[in-house]
Image (cartoon, coloured by chain):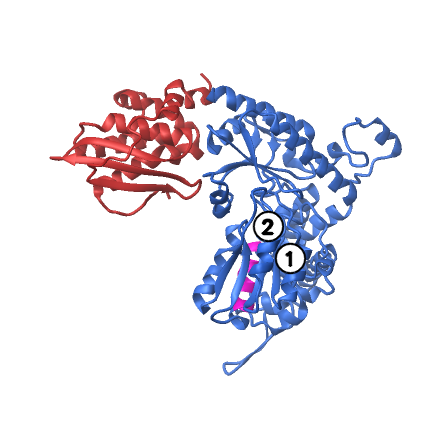
Chain colours: A red, B blue
Amino acid sequence: MSDLDELYQQVILDHNRSPRNYRALEGANRTAKGYNPLCGDEVQIYVQVEDGRIRDIGFQGSGCAISKASASLMTGELKGKTEPEARALFEQVHRMLTGEANGAEHEKLGKLAILSGVCKFPARVKCASLAWHTLKAALEGSGEVASTE
Amino acid sequence: MSTILTKAAREQSPACAPAGFDVHSVRRDFPLLHVKVRGKPLVYLDNGATSQKPRIVIDALARYYAEENSNIHRGVHFLSERATEAYESARDKVRRFINAPSTREIVFVRGTTEAINLVSQSYGRAFLQAGDEIVVSAMEHHSNIVPWQLLCDQIGAKLRVVPINHDGEIVLDEYRRLLNAKTKLVSIVHVSNALGTVVPVKEVVRLAHEAGARVLLDGAQAVPHLRVDVQDLGCDFYAFSGHKLFGPTGIGVLYGRAELLESMPPYQGGGDMISVVTFEKTHYNVLPYKFEAGTPHIAGGIGLGAALDYLERLDWREVERHERDLLAYATATLREIPGLRIIGTAREKAGVISFAFDHVHAHDVGTILDQEGIAIRTGHHCAMPVMQRFGVPATARASFAFYNTREEVDALARALHRVLKVFG
């Protein structure tokens, strides 16, 4: 598989076309806005946390296929996770996107491993990590706009 | 080096190519155009961001550092004299290039951005006051918006914006309506970096002067494509960058009419911009040195001079004809791509085609094109208000120089079909 085919796998294109959990959550008690000043990509993450666990999560925004698919995959993986688990996942995904993780670590990430092709495109790492940075900001409740810069 | 074809060569050139300009011969002068990117020949269509450099510019930089390096305007020694002469002769080349009356009116700066900031902070703070109005257009680069916002915050002036129509042209009637007795300065782009629109700047200048306002023209994207004559345009200030004009980065030009520059306070203080310094009072140097504090980018100035030498040898009527042909060919070719929308359809355009797909984001387009060795720019092009005006988060932009070819446009079209294949 070429680097390009690895980046734009069917799963990613499918999440881009029909993103999951693409909605504003009415019951959200944690939200944050993310912004990539280099390209203008925007994402808003809505999280409903109950007893330290993510009950529901949604997102909205505009961006490229990679940023949209990453946000969509993220919301799918996070439902039901505790806050520490979500933060740990953020660290693992970040390692994968920046090319620091090995094959075994990729496997542990399950469905999210589909994003591992991004590390071969340094200019696109921020596209894939935007939603995750925004999630972190939402959980920390900083209220500031998360930025990839 | 000459690009003028002999009669025989002209007769042999393909019918579709304009006569009198041999693009393939010109390309040989630019080393970087012959590299391979990801195993494919580079197709460089990001000239709006920066242009490639001819060998003569690269050599001039190396020769300066190898044979002439010295500080200017101060040494009595041989090298300093040579460096000073080379730097000042570059200033005269710039003067001739834009047909300015005097080298006193040619201020070397880092680039267009610094030139605009200089006018904003020196002219603006000295001659504008609370309630005055500054007019820009809706298709300015951030560098022709933010310096004026800073000034407005400092002195309480107001920024007014001339709207553009759906083709990306300035609405002249609205411009006329905006001008009034409070308008002190009009700062307008000559050629839009995001849309390629050529603004009828002569008319813009005439109307501003009728209203008693001064005019700065941002010529960063104009000078690589059009012959500019500041006296004919009648503008008060004209700004451009060396690196978009086949010269080095870090050097640019502010042209200002001498009487205005004389009346303006210095922009920065330091060495070279003074004549006498005591702790009681400092006397400033004459033009243009009053605005050139500190050791300048000597190599950059000399490199820009070399770029102008190169351009001087081209037949500009033929260059402009080649570029027009290329733009028309590229526009027609891209229009054939399903789902592609060209953003910026002004009647007068130069060098730029911005486009967007309904269902594919510009970044994804850029990444796929890059795999084919094609360099374009994607994003908001430092013109976020333009993106808002056209309701797109970003565009892909192919920007041309005279060394680009129809074959490269064909390669772009093939790669865009690949984009469509990936995204179904």
Residue B197 vertical placement versus B40 (above, below): below
Q: Residue sitting at 47 percent across and 46 percent down?
A: B384
Q: Amino acid at mark 2?
A: Ile
Most foreground residue, A99 or B341: B341
Instruction: Determine if residue B109 is in view.
Output: no
Query: Numbered disc 2: what chain?
Result: B
Most foreground residue, B93 or B345: B345
Q: Amino acid at mark 1?
A: Val
> Is B126 positioned to the left or the right of B71 in the image?
left
Q: Residue sitting at 81 percent across and 28 percent down?
A: B13
**Residue B254: mark:** none
Residue B145 vertical placement versus B196 (above, below): below
Residue B47 vertical placement versus B35 (above, below): below
Most foreground residue, B292 or B376: B376
- Magenta stretch? B112-124
Q: Quadrant of residue A94?
A: top left
Q: Are marks 2 and 1 in contact (CB under 8 Å)?
A: yes
> Disc 1 on helix, strand or loop?
helix
Residue B118 vertical placement versus B243 (above, below): below
Q: Main secondary structure of the magenta part?
A: helix
Q: Residue sitting at 53 percent across and 29 percent down?
A: B370
Q: Could you say where residue B275 lies in the image, as x and y percent from the top left?
A: 61, 75
**Residue B204: mark:** 1
Q: Could you say where residue B62 lies in the image, as x and y percent from the top left?
A: 65, 47
Query: Numbered disc 1: what chain?
Result: B
- The residue identified by callout 2 is B170
Q: Quadrant of residue A131?
A: top left
Q: Could you say where residue A149 lies in the image, as x and y percent from the top left?
A: 37, 44
